[in-house]
Each structure stands twice: as C-alpha cells, then as structure tokens.
Image: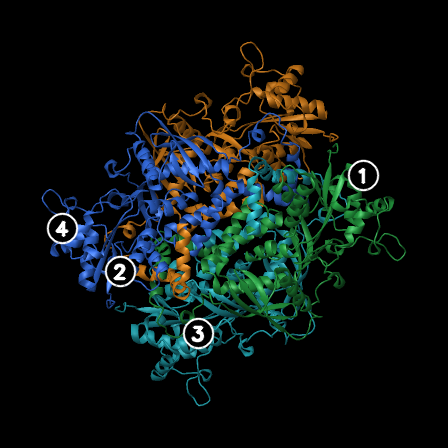
Chain colours: A blue, B orange, C green, D cyan
C-alpha cells in the first residue's frame, strides 16, 4: 500500500522507548511534522521528561503538548462510568478502556489547534486499544488520517524494535537492558492511569499459571496488608463520591486517596481471561484499588436511595454499557443514550457509606442518606401500621393467576415443567 | 373472612417453635388433619426430632414425612442456578430463594399422596418467602388451598406467640428463654440450608449499623481465618462442579466440602439492603461460603470455554434470571425458557479451576480445559502466523463508518456529544 | 371489612350510567361528599351534560370539575409514548393505557385543591384499568384513600346495576333500554379518547369469532374506504409530529386530523388476544387510526435520522417500555429513566415523511430530513470515493475470528452447531 | 496483495451474467479449478440452465452441483426464524439474510466433498451479504480460503463488467442489452427466494422517491388486488405452519401457497431505509407475501397458547435475534443459544388461525387451540366463580408499595416526576 501523504501528525507520546521509536519512524516513513502529546492521567510517572526527549528528536517546542488530565479523566470519564456500576464479563473494571476516549479527544483537539491532518498511537494490531483510539478519532473527526505503526511496520518483535532504536540513536533506558547492556527480554505489557494498572504477556500467556508475586506493582498482597482493619466513610452526591471521612476532595484527589487505601490493604487485584473485541481471548491482570472500593460503595449507597426498578433496569443495562466502553464506543450516540438513562437515576444518590478495609476485603458496614427509601417501619417483623399483611394474598393470587389458569386448562404442562427440571 | 373448609393440610414443619404453634393453630382453627413435612436441606440441624414433636401433637405416624433432600436440592436447584452466575442486585446469591421451590414441590407431592386439599407454611406476610412458597404451590397445583397463618392470625408479636404456646402446652426450647425462664427477646430471623444462612431483624434493621461479631454463625471472620492461604482445584463438567482436588463428589457432598473451606477461610459474608418483591427495602446478612467459591470458579472455567457472545448474552440475561428466582418464579415457563438458553451453553464448560483461599478472598490462580478456546498463538504479542494485523484496519473503519458518515453529514452532532460529556 | 371513614372523594365521572350509579353509591355507602371530575380526552362525547347530571344528584357546583385535557393528553402522554414506537405484544398501541395516568394525576390535583381524602374510579376488578388508575393515585399521593366500587359492592351484573339505578332514581338513557323500556343486554365494554376506541366483551369473548361489522364505530372498513389512495405529508420536530401537509397544528388537532384520515381510509383496526397484568388473557378490538399512521411515520423519519445503534437500543428497550405503560407504571422512576434514554435520541428526529393511505394500508413512500444520515454516496452500487471495499475483508475476518479459533481448536463444535440446526 | 495459491474453489453460481464473469475471472486470476454450486431456493428461475453454461465455460461435469434446497430452506431456516417473530428494525422480514447461511453451509459441504480449498461468492464489498456468506464459511470451516471478487477486482462499474464479458466471450443475455444490442443501464439489484424478493439501487437510492409501479415483480398492488376478501385458515404445530385450509403441506409447498395468496391480495410490500451491518444506511424494497401472512398468523396462535411472560421474553429477545440474523450470525453459538430459548416455548404453539386477506391487509379473525390458555370464565365481565375481585386490591397495593414508601419518605420526588413529564 502506498503511503498516504501526511503533513502533520499528532502522536500520543509517552516518552518511553516504543513511542519514541514511533516518533522517529513517523518522521522517516511519512516525512511529516510530528506533534507530541503527553498526558498525565495519573500513571505515576513523570511526564515532563517527555519534553526534552521530544526536543532531542527534533520536535519544535510549539509542537510539544504536555497536559495534566487527571481531574478531567476522573470527573468526566471515570465517575460517569462508575454511576453505571460497570463491570466487563463479571470482573474487569475497565481501567484501560475508560482512558482511551479522553486521549483520543485531546489528540483531535490538538490536531485542530495545530492544523495537523493525522493522529497516531502506539497500540498493537491485536489488541482492543487500537479500536478504542481510532473509534474516538473517527467519531470526533471523520476526516482525520489515522496512522497505526504497529499495523504498518515490520518491527514485529522486541529484537527488531531495539535494533531499530539503536540504529536511529534512540536512547534505550536501563530498564530495557540487562547488566551487560544487552537488550532484556520483553517486560509485561503494562498500562497505568489513576484508575488502574494492567499486565499482559509473558508468564501470563498461560492461563493455568499463577502470576508471579513481583509482577504486582501497586498493591500489597493481602498477606502483606496490615493485620488491622481500617474503616473509612465515603460521601456521595448525585452518584459521585465527593468526600472521604468527611473531607471534601476533588475527583482526582479522591480517587488517588482511595488508591492509597486500597494499595495498603491489598484491595483490587484481578486476574482474568477476557474476550477481546478483536476476537481472541486474552489473559490480563489488573490492580484497581480505588475503583474496587468505589464500586462496592456506590452499590451500597444506591441500595438505600434508588427505587427497586431503577436499580434493576440499571443492572439489566449494565453489561451492554460495559461492553460499549470495553469495545471503544464512548463517543457514540448509544453510550450517550444509555448515560442519559443512568444519570436520570443518580440525582438522589446522596449519602454516606462506611466501609471496612481488611486484607483484600471491602466490607460495607453501614449506609445512611437523607434520601433513603429504607423504611424500618415496613421491614420490621413486629406489627406495624403501614402494611396490611392481608394485601399479600391478593398480590400472590393475581401473580399466580396465569399459573392457575394454565394448571386448570392444560395440566400436562405442570408435569412438563417438573420433568424438565429433573433432567 | 369465613374460614374455608379444609380436610387435610400439609405443613412445612421444622419442628421449631413457630411451626409447632402453626401446627396447633391449624388443628384448632381449621379443625383439619395435619400432615407434617420436614426436610433436610443441609440446614445443619437434626430433622428426626421433628417426628417425636409431631407425634406429641397428635399427628398420625403415616402423616409425618421427614425427607433428606440435600442431593436433590443441590443437583436440581443450586447447580442449575449457578450455571447462570445468578446474583440479585449485584450481591445476593439467592440462598433462601432457591430452596423454596423444592419445598413447595414436595408439599404438593405429599398432598397428592395423602389426599390433602391444603398446604401451609410459616412465612410472614411481609416477606418474599410467602410468595415463593405460594407461587410454587399454585404453579404445581392450581386447586390446592393455601393457608398462610401469619396473614390470618393475630399472633403478630413475639409475646403473643409465646403466650399462645404456653397456653396450648407447646414446648418452648431454652433458646427462647432467658436464665429465669422468661421469654427472651426475639432472635434474628434466620434461614439455613446447604447453600447459605441468612439473618434479618433486630440490630440489622438500622442499615447504618455494623452487624455484631457474634451474629455470624458459620464462617470465621477474615481476621480469625488462618494466616496461611490454601489452594484448591475444582473440576467442572457441563457447567457443574464434580470434584475437588481430583476427588469426585456428589453434589451435596461437594457443596458441603466447599462450605467447610469457605467457613475456615472467612469467605462469603454478605451484608446488604435489598429490594423485596413485596415492595419494601430490607437489610439482610448472609453467609454463602461454598456458593461464593463456586460463583468465582464457574466464571473462571467459563472464561476459557465459552464463546464471547454466549458469555455476554448470559450476562445480559442474568439479572432477569436472578430476579425471577428471587421473586419466586422457579416453576414458571419463563424460567424454563431462560434455563434452556443457559444450559445450551454449558455442554462445553468442562475443565479445572485452581483457587487460592485466604482470609475472605477467593482468588483464581489458574484455569485449564480440554475444551479451551484460549489460543496463546492469537494473544501473544510476538508475531504470529494466525492473525493478520492489517485486518484490524478494516474492522475499525467499518465499525466507525456510521460515525464517519455522521461526522461528515451532521458535524454539529460531534459537538453535541462532547458537550454532553462535559456537563 | 368495615368501611373506612371518608370525608370527600373525587370521582372520575363520565356522566354515564355506571359512574352515576357509583356517585350515588358513594354518597350512600360512604356518606361522603363527592367531587366529580369529567375530562374531555377527545372521546367524542359532550362532557358538559355531566354537569347537570351531577347537580341533579346533589353535587355542589364548586365540586364539579369539567376539563378539556385534549392538548395535555396528546402533548405530554401520547407523543412521548410514540417517540418510543411503543407496541404491546406486537399489536396493541396502548390507547387506553396511556389515558389513565393523566386522569389519575388530575384526580389527585383536584383532591388537593378540594381537600378530598379519597379518589374513586369505575374500573372493574378484573381489568388492567383499576391498576393503572390506582398506581397513579398512590404514586402521586401515598396517603390518598382509594375507593374501587366494583371490588366492593355486589352489583356484579348488568341486571343488578339497572335495578339499583331504577331504585335510586338514576336516569337510564335510552341506549340501555330496548323499545319496550326494558333493560337491554349489556353493550360492548368500550373506552375512547383521541388515540383510540376499544371494545371488549359479548361476542368477542370467543377468540375464534370474527367481530361483527357494526361493532366498529370509528373507521370505515377497508372495503368501504375510498377506492382512491390519498397522500399526506407529516412534518416531525424532535420526534413529535407538528404539521400535516405543511400546515402546523397543535398536538390534539394534529392527532384529530390523522384520525380523520385514518377513519376515512379504513386504517387502524386491531383484533387481538392480549395478556392482562392481572393474569388472564382477554380478547380486545381497537381502532387507532391516527396512531397507526403516526407509528409508521415515526419509524420512517427515524430510519434516516437516527444512528443505527440508537435505533437498535430503542427497539430492545421498547417491549419493556410498552409493558410498563400497559401495566400502569407511567408515574414510576423506571419510566422516567427509560424516557430519558428515548428522548436523548429524538433531538435530531426532524424532517418529513410522505405517506400513501389506501384501504387499511399506510405506505411510506418518501422520507427526507436536513438531519439525514443517509448517504447516497455510500450506498450506491457504483464505485465511490468514500468507501474502501477492501476494508470489508478485515471487518469480516475479525468478526469471524472467534469462530476461526473455535473451529481450529474445537472442531467438533461445528458439527454440533449443524446438527442442532437440523433437529 | 499477492494472490494466494488456490487449488479449487466452490463458487455460488446463479448462471447469470455476474457470477459467470466471476467464474471466468477465478479461472484466469487464480488459475484454479472451479466447482459451481447452483441452488433452487424458490427464486422462481430455472436452475438447470446453469449446468450448460458451466459446461460451456469448461467446468467438469462432476464439478457442477445443482441442488433443490427449497424444503431444507423453509424447514430448517425460515420456520425457526418465524418462531421468533423476527423483524429487523421494525419492518424487514429478513428474506435475504436467512438464505445466506444455507448457501454457505452447502458450499462448505461441497468443498469438503470435492477437496476444494476455497469458496467464492458474488456479493459486493459494500453490502451485508458478503458478511453473511463469509461468517458462514469461516464459522463452518476455519481453514477455507475465501475469494470475494468484488473486493479484489477493478470491474467496479456496469460498463467494465460488460466489457470484460464481451472480451472473454461470456454470453450477455438480452435483458442486459437495449434494442440496439448495447449494454443497458444497470437493473435494480435483486435477490429472490421462496421467502422474498428484494430491490435496491437506481431510483430507490433517493429515499424521498416513491418506487415505480413496475418495479414490483411478485405482488399485485393493493389497488390491483381483488375487490373480494378471501379467508384462509392456517394450522400450526409446535410453532410451525403445517396446513392451509386443512390441507397438510410440506414446508416449501406451504410457503409457496401463502406466497400465491399474498401476491394475489397485494400483501407484503415493504419499503424502508435500513442500517447495514457494514455501517451505512440503505434503501430497500421487499416483497414478502407469504412471510407477512405467517408473521401475523404466528403471533395470533401464540396469543392464545403462550404464557404471558414467555411471550414478553420472546419480544424482548427478538430485536437481538433479528439483528444476529441480519448481520450474518446464523452459525453462531449465540444464535443457537437464543433458538434454544425460543424453541422451548413452541411445544404448545398448536392450533388454527383464521385470516382475512384483502387488498394488502392480513386480518386475524379467529384463533383456536386445544392448548389454549384463554379462559372465557376469567375474562368475562359478569360475575364468576374463579376470580376473586378483592384480590386485586392487595395486588395493587403491594405493587404500589415502593411508591407509597417513596411518597411518604421523599415526597419531593413526586413533584420531580410530574415536572419531568411536563418538560
């Protein structure tokens, strides 16, 4: 395929080895100007060093964008998703998936500002991230050109990459070399942001193998976690957490604080085989300390403030919502549509949840709210003034009426139900 | 309401105080013959003593039915439900709900055998269990009369009940009396079977209050659990567990064994506010040690053996399925219909899951199966022969086509998406 | 059951025989003041005569409320429902169901204004309408007392009703008597408003019997309809129709106009057996002339203005939405939640639909919109600049990847799929 | 892209111009042996002439497969789909979609028999059919090579195709030429089988334009249809039609007979803008005469034989099921899973439906079944012995309980509901 003509490309640039190689490759292969975009999403690494690296590779100062997106990330992406109690395939809290749409959006904005006609990312051709980035790009700018080097080049192994770097004078940090200065075996494939850190590859490619202890970078193991439980209280307003132990915090600070609690108490390790959108199964390990706490707390505050059928409809929609985000459809009309339904329920999700954190466990020990729908008078076992027990008979008899009629008119269907159950 | 004429009633009889009072009350109020039915569902109490108590209250020997239903309970009710990964409202494993349809079925069968024209149960008029029992009764015999004493009598407090017992010479066991022989304050409302034990009432009626430590009867607390983790392996066949650590076990034995593991390691405590079918919210605490392990293990074996879209469709149907069982619709055509869909996926859910149990945590550390769909060749990050990375471009571009067209034809909709996200 | 003490009751009063009997009965049985509420919902009968009748029965002038609700009915109830393309059980356009929540709301408002402590309606104890009325009452005022005479009195046959009327001096209009002044056999049970007229009972109770020709009151039969087709154009704005043939109309006028077209051309007769919320099946016949046209037109304008996945998600939610309305849950948080999702899609549902009306047929013959997402360039069969046909290969191969992996790893599953299909 | 090495390819060959060009092109470009497969699916054209044409192009007699698939098509594909009442986007009866999986399956079987390593089809790169064919191929044989000439060659216009045909001596039938023997403008893109005939392209590419009268090939227009209505009765067994007017018929004969009725009475024309799986909207017109009758009849027989919740769950699953088939996922585990749920309900769908056919209208005028769940005793308006009207009060009050509690505890939510409705 003949290379397209590209004038200027905005690259999602971490400053690390892989995206530095991409930067160079874009300059060489496309002979285009490159704009670098480096975001602080709370991944826990300095972003400023990327500036010097970019300058060293000939990027003009005005083409270097380094942005602190932590508050926007948590407020406009993480929190709306947690309002939905989103979990993919029963386990995964979508930590990587939810960061991609924000990166896409910023790249498109920077392309607009700088007059770039292309965007580029460092995701491979076998994963979900390429889809998430590019659905974002094309969803927000249908005319943008997309360059996905991993699908175009032939640097399809660790060795070839390092050789390319050496050949082009790209600095290889020590973590990629052994003590003799030779290229080290590939590390885990990792991704981190304020919500989580993920691990794929290597040892994990065997789904029967337990992860090595030293793979986990954030959390204490439950064994290492303190022997003493700790209690915290989270305050919710309109479905979002706004304070911990009574102290109001910005979204990013709040999530960071929950991460600290979770890391300390060994909370939020996940080890799964998941189904990728591009068709294969993949083993992934994740640490989502704060998110694991938030999910539990949000369900707890909803348990006293949401109407039953709102809660059930949310539960029925959730798998579809989680799938949308996993597959990269944040910037879609159907996500907006589902979000409208979810958000319509969160106005009254206000109050406090008390949690006990202990060696990997997040235990809800109390919930309270001025908007509670819990009525002690109705749930007590003693007699009350508000509930007429006789009502239950009519309730049951009319709910059973279709069975009664069926049983009278077509009695053999009962036998069929029973037989079916015993097979 | 004039009492109906009842000839003979089959009572779900535990041998405890409440159902003994009901037995007497049925004899007095309905002047009918009573058949007692006492089931061993693994609740952990002897069932044989119920025989003597029934005889003492004048029940004819041939009208006393004491059945060991543990295997049938686990095989035909618990296991099919776990194939669906059923959870109600994100937390509750349906331990009480799933036992009711079996009790209903047996009562109807015994009514048929003994020529009884009525059935009776000891569930109150404010709870879900009355619905579950009676939908079962009427679903399996539309002509049966149902007697729900708690909805009919005026013994609507602990004190009145104990007075009635005393007056009618019903033995009150010591656990209902304090050291002076006076009636003790009401205990928690509890229900137990092989799958779980539940607690409601008292202290729990305040959803902001943490349960008292000594309420929990089955499990060690995570704090008390061993400091050493333990590994177990569960073998699955057609979606059901059949062996632990390579040792084949009957369904009930297997669940009992998992309960032992769970109790030891502090696994399976649940503390929630749930939405009852009869309309109010209620606080409930549950211990489901073996079930908690099974849910995690079943999802893990499914993760390598199920096709992606099967798994997702199961996840979308699950909340509805769980609600059916919670609400008491086991014996309904729609449960049968959903079960057909679920079971159609389980033929290939075979293999082994290795778990680590530690202080409340159930951690999947390995899964393997001869029927695995996991392909290391496809998920590896190195180059491979089986996957053409270039395919991803077409995949993404066609999935994005509706956005591209929208963006070109109606560009203002993009602005609306972004604006909407920031609100 | 002892009669509750009622001070003042707001009765949904049509002025007809049945609700006149109820009025009298309320006065006698409850010895309470009665407030009459008569609504013009477009049922096609004068509402003013109800005033004199009420006065004749001793109702104070300030207790007589006669309201023209036609615009509110169509704008705030019918139109939102049609945005969802709601159909119950594949056929029924919910004409009765959608009127009940408005009546409930007005009764509660009038109770508030007049200081009434009760509301009452004339729906029977076997139908859905009692549920719809009362869920509305209790949803909007939890303390209101509800009087449902049909469930309380013993006037459970036509003959007893007429006897009661005679005895209490209630005027029996000629349509209830034969030529000799004797009570006539009961008519069809009917309900009408701007959206539809319904028929139940009599001859229809045999589901194998065709309705009699003279039952249908509104529409021409297709046979009687003109031999010449007629074309009309409906203009949509934000999902609601706002003009016919370019002439802007208020909601009620627009629906009335569509009814005229539909009646003339034999459009909108429905004959079904439906499943009532209270548990039994019932035969119903309906005429929904304008609604039938609107449903077709709304789908057509959506077909060019909605994104595919919005449209599909609407289709997936629709049966649940329709069921909510059928069952009487308009005033529920879950309806509000679903409406939020639906309305979030309708902002862009603008444009024109051209229809051909002919002997029962509503045929879409054209749709156009400034907000169209239809791209002739993309759908043409000739070559184009905007679509790369090669993309389809990657799209297909990645969508097939799970099958390819399954086929390679577990080939016997293919055989099972095929075998299953042939059974 | 270098051409893959292909030994032998099975081509879906109609005998028409396009697939004859493909045949030749395969021989030339791939230098491979070609096996032709021509199926009679009831498209209404002779299939035997394809044999001579194939021979003329050098195909060996043993490589020519001409199969009558009409019975298998209707029995194993059309009927199972109609059990689901499948409709795509509210209108389309999936006539093209449902034929593709059978063709795919046969091609794979013939490839197996003849030792072919590739399959090929004549669908373009912009449509759904390529997806449907190829998901079938790859779902049934993961190793098969797929050749999609329309995505590979550069014959991307009518003119180039005809030029290619002329150059290679492929006979061009008169319908492709004008009176002077010059290539005629392209016809509608059409597809036909026993279930339907479809039209796309040309004049239809403007969604505002009404189809030309002479486009429709099968049905009378409603105007041309007889002035006299006709009544027919369809007998159902386990959800499938088995007889018309009491005369038992094979599946294909039955559908053919219904087509004759429908064509005569102007039934089954559909004109829509649909959303293609590959991402764009497309205008399509369809004639599905027999299918339109079957859909109506099947719903009618279900209306008296299915339990309410079975019917509702079917309605909720239907859009997803229809989408699966539209998108080409017949041979998927998720379709099998949904079919299991659907089929589990059809055991009792037995009985007779009487229909009136008149000028485009299919009117249900009666349904009867030995397995009916309709109970006249329960639905009558007169008093009865089987239903206690007082039960309705309890039913309503418990269904309203969550509103009552909400209204008492959080009264401002009521105001919010009302306000929301008026916006």
Disc 2 designates what residue? Answer: A114
Q: Tell me, yes or no, whether the two marked residues, 1 and 2, touch with CB atoms within 8 Å.
A: no
Which one is in front in this view, the residue at disc 2 or the one at disc 3? 2
Q: Same chain, marks 3 and 1?
A: no
Q: Residues within 10 Å of mark 4 (few under 14, many from 20)?
A: some
User: CA separation, marks 1 and 2?
Assistant: 83 Å
Estimate how packed mark 1 is, as few (under 14), some (14 to 19) or many (20 or more) residues with alpha carbons within 10 Å: few
Chain name for mark 2: A
**CA separation in Å, label 3 and label 4:** 61 Å
Q: Which residue does the numbered mark 4 point to in the structure image?
A: A171
Q: Name the residue under label 1.
A: C28
Tell me the mark number nearer the camera, choosing from 1 and 2. 2
Same subunit, labels 1 and 4: the answer reads no
Tell me how far mark 2 sits from mark 3, CA to CA: 54 Å
* B31 vs C335, nearest the viewer: C335
SS state under label 4: loop
- Marks 2,3: beta carbons within 8 A: no
The residue labelled by disc 3 is D14
D68 vs C37, nearest the viewer: C37
Q: Residue D85 at what x, y percent from top left?
A: 56, 58
On the same chain, marks 1 and 2? The answer is no
């Amino acid at each position: 395929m003949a290379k397209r003509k590209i004038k200027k490309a905005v690259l999602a640039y971490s400053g690390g080895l892989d995206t530095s190689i991409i930067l160079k490759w874009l300059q060489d292969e496309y002979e285009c100007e490159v704009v670098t975009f480096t975001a602080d999403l709370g991944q826990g690494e300095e972003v400023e060093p990327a500036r010097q690296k970019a300058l060293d590779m000939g990027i003009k100062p005005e083409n270097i964008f380094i942005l602190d997106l932590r508050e926007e990330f948590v407020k406009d992406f993480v929190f709306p998703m947690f309002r939905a109690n989103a979990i993919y395939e029963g386990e995964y809290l979508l930590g990587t998936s939810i960061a991609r749409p924000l990166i896409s959006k910023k790249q498109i904005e920077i392309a607009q500002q700088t007059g770039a006609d292309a965007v580029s990312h460092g995701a491979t051709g076998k994963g979900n991230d390429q889809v998430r980035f590019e659905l974002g790009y094309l969803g927000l700018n249908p005319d943008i050109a997309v360059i996905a080097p991993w699908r175009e080049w032939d640097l399809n192994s660790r060795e070839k990459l390092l050789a390319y770097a050496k050949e082009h004078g790209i600095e290889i940090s020590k973590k990629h070399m052994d003590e003799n200065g030779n290229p080290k075996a590939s590390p885990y494939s990792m991704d981190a942001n304020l919500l989580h850190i993920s691990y794929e590859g290597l040892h994990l490619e065997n789904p029967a193998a337990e992860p090595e202890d030293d793979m986990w970078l954030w959390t204490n193991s439950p064994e290492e976690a303190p022997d003493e439980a700790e209690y915290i209280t989270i305050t919710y307003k309109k479905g979002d957490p706004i304070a911990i132990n009574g102290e109001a915090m910005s979204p990013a600070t709040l999530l960071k604080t929950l991460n600290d609690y979770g890391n300390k108490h060994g909370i939020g390790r996940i080890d799964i085989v998941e189904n990728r959108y591009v068709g294969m199964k993949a083993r992934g390990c994740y640490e989502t300390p704060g998110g694991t706490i938030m999910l539990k707390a949000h369900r707890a505050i909803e348990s006293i403030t949401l109407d039953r059928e709102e809660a059930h409809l949310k539960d029925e929609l959730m798998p579809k919502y989680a799938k949308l985000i996993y597959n990269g459809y944040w910037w879609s009309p159907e996500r907006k549509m589902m979000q409208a339904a979810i958000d319509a329920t969160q106005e009254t999700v206000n109050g406090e949840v008390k949690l006990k954190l202990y060696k990997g466990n997040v235990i809800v020990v109390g919930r309270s709210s001025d908007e509670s729908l819990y009525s002690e008078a109705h749930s007590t076992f003693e007699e009350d003034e508000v509930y007429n027990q006789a009502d239950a008979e009519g309730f049951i008899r009319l709910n059973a009426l279709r069975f009664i009629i069926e049983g009278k008119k077509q009695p053999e269907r009962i036998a069929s139900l029973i037989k079916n159950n015993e097979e």
